[in-house]
Image (cartoon, grey):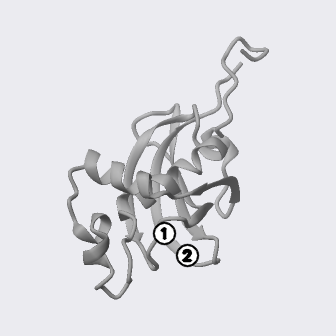
C-alpha cells in the first residue's frame, strides 16, 4: 500500500502519459518450440506451418514459424509493466496489426511503445483513452510485429 492507503502499481495513470512518449521495455523473451506448440494446441490452430517441420521445410521459410497471435500477445505482454499494470480498465481494440518478418523458434524478442493519441472519455470522467503503438523486434534488429492498441486508462486518484 502507498501513503494514501491505495495500492502502489507500476503502471501509469492516464494523467501520466503524453503524446509522443516512448518506452523501450526492458523485458526480453526467447521464444521456444514449446511456446509455439502449446499456444497452437490451446487455440486449436492446426496450421502445419506452425507445427509440422517436414511441411514447413518445403516453404519459403524453410522451417516452422511461430504463431503470429502468440507474437502479438507476447509483444503486448512485455509492455504491461511499464504502461498499464494496475491502471487500465481494459483494452478497447487493436488496429493495424502487422507482422513484417516471421518469428522462429529460438528468436529473442523485445518491445517498444510510443503513445500516439490521447483523449478524455466522453462518458466516464474518471478515465481516458490512450492509443499505444507497440513494436516488437528480434535479436537481429528486425521488426517482427507492430500494432496500435487503444486502452481505457484510469486517471490518477485524487487524495
| Label 2 CA crowd tier, 10 Å (few <14, some 14–19, many 20+) | many
Establish if 30 lies above or below 89.
below
What numbered label is drawn on residue 49? none
Residue drawn at (57%, 34%) of the image: 87
In which image quadrant can residue 139 be found?
A: bottom right
Image quarter where the N terminus lies is: top right
Q: What kind of element bears circle 1?
A: strand
The front one of 103 and 114 is: 103
CA gap, disc 1 and disc 2: 8 Å
Q: Is residue 101 left or right of residue 16?
A: left
Q: Which residue is drawn at 27% across and 68% down?
A: 52
Query: How many marks do you count on the picture?
Result: 2
Q: Which residue lies furthest to the front in this view?
A: 54
- Residue 1 position (above or below residue 49): above
In the shown orientation, is residue 5 left or right of residue 67?
right
Write down the quadrant of residue 106 in the picture: bottom right
Task: Indicate left or right for 157 with 126 as reference.
Answer: right
Please say if 88 is above or below 17: above
Q: Are marks 1 and 2 in contact (CB under 8 Å)?
A: yes
Determine the residue positioned at 43% across, 58% down. 33
Q: In which quarter of the image is the C terminus?
A: top right
Residue farthest along the right direction in this orientation: 3
Picture coordinates of residue 154 (x, y %)?
Answer: 55, 34
Disc 1 target residue:
146
Q: In this view, does 39 lie to the left or right of 125?
A: left
Point out residue 40 in the picture as x, y percentages from the top left corner: 29, 54
In this view of the protein, which residue sits in the foreground, 110 or 62? 62
Q: Which mark is residue 143?
A: 2
Is 127 placed above or below 70 here? above
Amino acid at each position: 500500500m502507498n501513503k494514501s492507503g491505495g495500492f502502489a502499481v507500476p503502471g501509469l495513470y492516464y494523467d501520466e502519459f503524453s503524446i509522443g512518449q516512448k518506452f523501450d521495455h526492458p523485458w526480453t523473451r526467447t521464444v521456444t518450440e514449446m511456446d509455439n506448440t502449446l499456444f497452437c494446441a490451446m487455440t486449436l490452430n492446426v496450421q502445419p506451418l506452425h507445427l509440422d517441420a517436414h511441411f514447413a521445410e518445403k516453404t519459403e521459410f524453410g522451417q516452422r514459424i511461430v504463431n503470429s497471435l502468440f507474437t502479438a500477445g507476447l509483444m503486448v505482454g512485455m509492455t504491461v509493466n511499464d504502461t498499464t499494470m494496475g491502471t487500465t480498465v481494459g483494452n478497447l481494440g487493436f488496429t493495424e496489426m502487422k507482422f513484417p518478418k516471421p518469428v522462429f523458434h529460438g528468436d529473442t524478442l523485445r518491445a517498444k511503445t510510443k503513445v500516439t493519441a490521447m483523449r478524455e472519455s466522453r462518458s466516464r470522467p474518471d478515465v481516458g483513452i490512450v492509443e499505444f503503438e507497440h513494436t516488437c523486434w528480434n535479436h537481429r534488429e528486425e521488426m517482427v510485429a507492430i500494432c496500435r492498441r487503444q486502452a481505457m486508462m484510469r486517471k490518477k486518484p485524487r487524495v
